[in-house]
Image (cartoon, grey):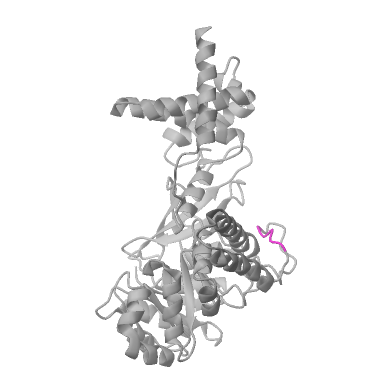
Amino acid sequence: MACLPYPTFRLTPTATYDALSLPAVGRARIHPLSCPGAMLIPASPPDSRSDCAIDDPAVYYRSVLEKCVMQSRTGEEDKKMRKMYMKQGVALASSFLSVFLGVDVSIVDAEVVLPIQDVVGSDGCLASCFLDAGCARVVLEVEKDSIREALEACDACRLPKERIVLHFSGDSDFRSAFDVAREEICQRAGTISVQIMTNDANAMKNVADSITQDTETKFVIQLSCTDGNDNSLYNTVRKFAKSIKEDQGHISLIDPTAQQLGYCYAECMKTDRTDGLYTTVVCTRSGEALGLVYSSKESIVAALKSGRGVYYSRSRNSLWRKGDTSGHHQTLHRIDVDCDGDALRFTVTQNGEKTKSFCHLDTLTCWGEPRGLRHLEGVLRQRLVDAPAGSYTKRLFEDHQLLRDKLVEEAQELSEADSKQHVAEELADVLYFAMVRAVKAGVSIDDAVMELDKRARKVTRRQGDSKAFRIQAGNDILGKNKEGKNT
């Protein structure tokens, strides 16, 4: 669906209770030097998920920049030192994004606004650092009459253009630059962002058409939410969304409230239901469907405001805050719209004290017991607290060395499997022992999915050679096991 809106955090603290879940629309833009993060958090409600440290965003950001500058000034001949600075910078950036700003970059497409002089001064290392930390894109703001400096910063990044956004603070600045450097801009940036000073759908359409004409470049039209006329904002968004082809760009709202963002989001959707509701599929982080529900504009707003799974109950004709009665509440991670723009997907973590159940029949899903890895995970969790006598799984939980040895042994057998069936069998063995290790450590399938999604954002890739000391350690374990079998 065209033009789905997302928040730009310029002055609003991202980690306050009211703003923490707004990125759940799937995308967010953050100004790290002006967005207060946790700095100005008031006393949070008892159920607040904010656990951010109190700190100065500028100081935190400068610590990341310092590591990136040191990395850029270390010669290629000292690869070990460059790698150390790179890892330290990424660790600081990751903490800045997740702890200080409260953004889950593993599932939200986060855009970070970086000063052009800092990108150039670090020889592009700052941009790569934030992408390696999980950001989807870096945003470079073009100052008035400074398009050449912006293009230089793009070149310093040495990134795929799909990971770069060039932002103009006004449509006049955009047009003066685009008229003289259109081809150069589109060669370097996959997205062009323009702030429109008046919420006018026609002006927005003219800018969007200029960007997308004869190019595959995406647009972002940025709007202010502070004029006090929310109905005018909703009408503008609806009119503009209807005028744009699918998958050409987005709208970004500067420092919106949950109500402003939620209603604008709904204005970009459609429904053929007479009650105006949207069919909604509720899923886990790994994409498993938990159940089918319905959403209203008001329930979308309530979900964004609370960070929970909130839907509309047709039987009660009111909002349904999942878990208020049963205790099986949901943590909201992301909301997506399907390709036709008339259905929603809520990605959540299902919670519960004894069991994690979405269904009223006390099962995880409304389609009965899970299968495959999710079924295995459930069985292993049960074995961890209540295993029958003689349980091999319980023995693995209690004997760390045995579990380690079996992981190495089964991985070696998988590496030597020589047929499709054999590979499937050995893979199943590895997955079993790996899941035992995970459940023992309190790690879920969704935790692993989160890590994989975060790693997919990286632009810096390691060479990936095998580590001799790990190979030797594995050989020692395999040799010991072989000796034990022969005695």
In terms of depth relative to the viewer, which is nearer, 253 or 342?
253
Against 63, residue 78 (above or below) is above
On-image quarter of the N terminus: bottom left
Q: Does the magenta-highlighted stretch encompass residue 137?
A: no
- Which quadrant would residue 341 be assigned to in this image? bottom left
Q: Position of residue 108 (x, y in %)?
A: 49, 61
Against 192, residue 340 (above or below) is above
Q: Is residue 322 visible?
A: no
Q: Residue at x 50, y 32 (%)?
A: 471
Highlighted magenta segment, given as a residue range: 49-53
Left or right: where does residue 64 sit relative to residue 314? right
Left or right: where does residue 321 sit relative to residue 188? right
Q: Position of residue 56 (x, y in %)?
A: 70, 71
Q: Residue furthest right?
A: 43
Q: Residue furthest left?
A: 214
Against 306, residue 235 (above or below) is below
Q: Residue at x 30, y 70 (%)?
A: 246
Q: Residue at x 27, y 76 (%)?
A: 215
Q: Main secondary structure of the magenta part?
A: loop
Q: Position of residue 8 (x, y in %)?
A: 52, 74
Q: Position of residue 425 (x, y in %)?
A: 37, 25
Against 1, residue 287 (above or below) is above
Left or right: where does residue 236 sit relative to residue 85? left
In terms of depth relative to the viewer, which is nearer, 363 or 418?
418
